[in-house]
Amino acid sequence: MAVLKAELDMFCRKARESDVMKPRIAIPEPCSYDLEYSGRAMPAYLRAVEAAGGEAIIIPLKSTPEEIARAATSCAAILLPGSKADVDPQKYNAEKHSATAPADQPRDSVDELLLQDAYNLRKPVFGICYGLQSLNVWRSGTLVQHIESAVNHNAGAKVDVAHEVVVAADSLLGLVIVPTQKKVILVNSSHHQSADIIGDGLRVVAYCTDDRVVEAIEGTTLGHHVIAVQWHPERSFEKDIVSSNLFKTFVEAARNWDHF
């Protein structure tokens, strides 16, 4: 924990010393087969990134691999948003559950190319909802395809608080983003799947207090900012300190990416 704290202190010092600039953040369109959802969901991500001091760069899902590579080269970090789709269970060797939504190959392809670039160059990664699931599967993890619980994890965008989440005190999420000593926060919730077996180089850092569904994971490599949450902080960043801190810390990591 002392090593992680020293790393965070160095990170914060470099953030203060860096020139004021707007790091470019690559964000893939949420869903290729539900354009209404994508058009409704995307503005919240853009506002949250821009409010935190970043410049959001939308990656169209119709982009060629060459276009994605060029866009990724110009960006210092990637944000993987939510989606109406579910990750194809074949990617983690599972039979498709009857409640699993159709897969989205164009979205998966963009995510995979952006993640490969980010991991090759240690660019910051921030996953939200489907973005957490996409990251976990890409790192060879698996998913619970349909959560069976008394907790309503699929409460929807109109429900500001769905349940409590407990956060690991010795994590980046706990040390930097959750400001109180009691590492319990209230979150919204719009998902029916969650991480099961955790992928390589990732660890669980938050779970629902009532049913222990995984609510956040982060990378285990010091110096590489990788955080993914199952809730939707883009919906609440203007009024919730944890949501705001998630975006601010991510954008600061992007601003200082080339210093690592």
Image (cartoon, grey):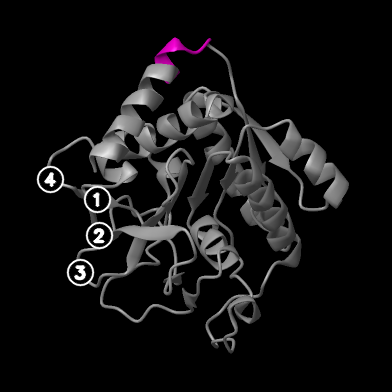
Magenta stretch: give its range: 15-19
Identified by mark 4, the residue type is Lys
- Circles 1 and 3 in contact, beta carbons < 8 Å: no
Is 18 part of what is drawn in magenta? yes
For disc 3, the marked residue is 210
For disc 4, the marked residue is 182
Q: Residue 10 location in percent, x, y?
A: 37, 24
Q: In which quarter of the image is the N terminus?
A: top left
Identified by mark 1, the residue type is Leu
| Mark 1 secondary-structure assignment | strand
Instruction: Give the crowd class for mark 4: few <14, some 14-19, many >=20 residues within 10 Å.
Output: few
Q: Nearer the viewer, residue 24 or 124?
A: 124
Looking at marks 2 and 4 on the same chain, the residue that comes earlier in the sequence is marked by 2
Placement of 127 over or under 25, stated as above or below: below
C-alpha distance separating marks 3 and 4: 16 Å
Classify residue 57 as left or right of residue 16: right
Looking at marks 2 and 3 on the same chain, the residue that comes earlier in the sequence is marked by 2
Q: Residue 106 location in percent, x, y?
A: 76, 61
Q: Residue 78 location in percent, x, y?
A: 60, 42
Q: Nearer the viewer, residue 170 or 78?
A: 170
Looking at marks 3 and 4 on the same chain, the residue that comes earlier in the sequence is marked by 4
Does residue 177 appear anywhere in the picture?
Answer: no
For disc 1, the marked residue is 186
Look at 58% across and 39% down and name the residue there. 123
Placement of 175 over or under 189, stated as above or below: above
